[in-house]
Amino acid sequence: MKRAWAFSCILALSAILGGCGKDGSQNATQDSGASASQASAQLGQAASDTPAASGAQKWSAPAAVAKAQLPGEAAETLRLIKAGGPFPFGEDGVLFRNSAALLPQHPRGYYHAYTVRTPGSADRGQRRIVCGGPRRQTGDCYYTDDYYASFKRIAD
């Protein structure tokens, strides 16, 4: 029973990853008689072809947004960053690891994240500002309104 379930999972993942192949029409489970080891090998091959699996992601600079175009709450957050606080949330100023590599690469500890208040939200919401460099410096900051899924560089 466990083997059948594992084989089904491998085939499903293989089909998903195979459908994402370079030519867009590749399907790793075309042969319904494929063995578990063949499906596993195909799954490994499909995964190794993807940039995320190999660790080689192409980085592109985020779009820019002027400070004047940001929500008023973001301007207040930038003011608090320059002043060194006090920040409204205990999590403000925590290390941001940039693990998705959406921002320029820098050594660990370079980026810190800060909450941008969201009116009407019962929690911290999804808006943040991430700044790089020494604390209280806002020369290398980025705004996100979708909880780190995308960023815009804050331009002066």
Image (cartoon, grey):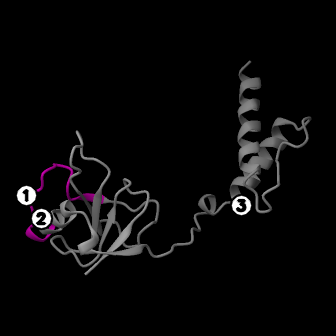
Magenta stretch: dominant secondary structure: loop
The amino acid pointed to by label 2 is Leu
Quarter placement of the N terminus? top right
Q: Is residue 91 left or right of residue 22?
A: left
Note whether 141 is above or below 4 in the view shown: below
- For image coordinates 14% across by 64% down, the residue present is 76
Residue 16 screen position, x and y as percent: 72, 45
Residue under numbered circle 2: 80
Q: Which residues are magenta?
A: 80-95
**Residue 18: x %, y % from top left:** 77, 50
- The amino acid marked with disc number 3 is Asp
Q: Are marks 2 and 3 in contact (CB under 8 Å)?
A: no
Q: Quadrant of residue 135?
A: bottom left
Q: Which mark is residue 148?
A: none
Q: Is residue 109 above or below residue 7?
A: below
Label 1 or label 2, whichever comes before in sequence order:
2
Would residue 125 appear left or right of 73 to someone viewing this image? right
Regarding mark 3 in the picture, which secondary structure is present there? loop
Q: Earlier in the sequence, mark 1 or mark 3?
A: 3
Residue 11: percent from the left, percent from the top?
77, 37
Quadrant hosting residue 63: bottom left
Q: Nearer the viewer, residue 62 or 90?
A: 62
Q: Which of 42/144 is in front? A: 144
Q: Which residue is identified by label 1?
A: 86
Q: Are marks 1 and 2 in contact (CB under 8 Å)?
A: yes
Q: CA distance from mark 1 to mark 3?
A: 47 Å
- Indicate which disc, 2 or 3, sits on the residue closer to the N terminus: 3
> Label 1 to label 2, Cα distance in Å?
7 Å
Secondary structure under tag 1 reads loop
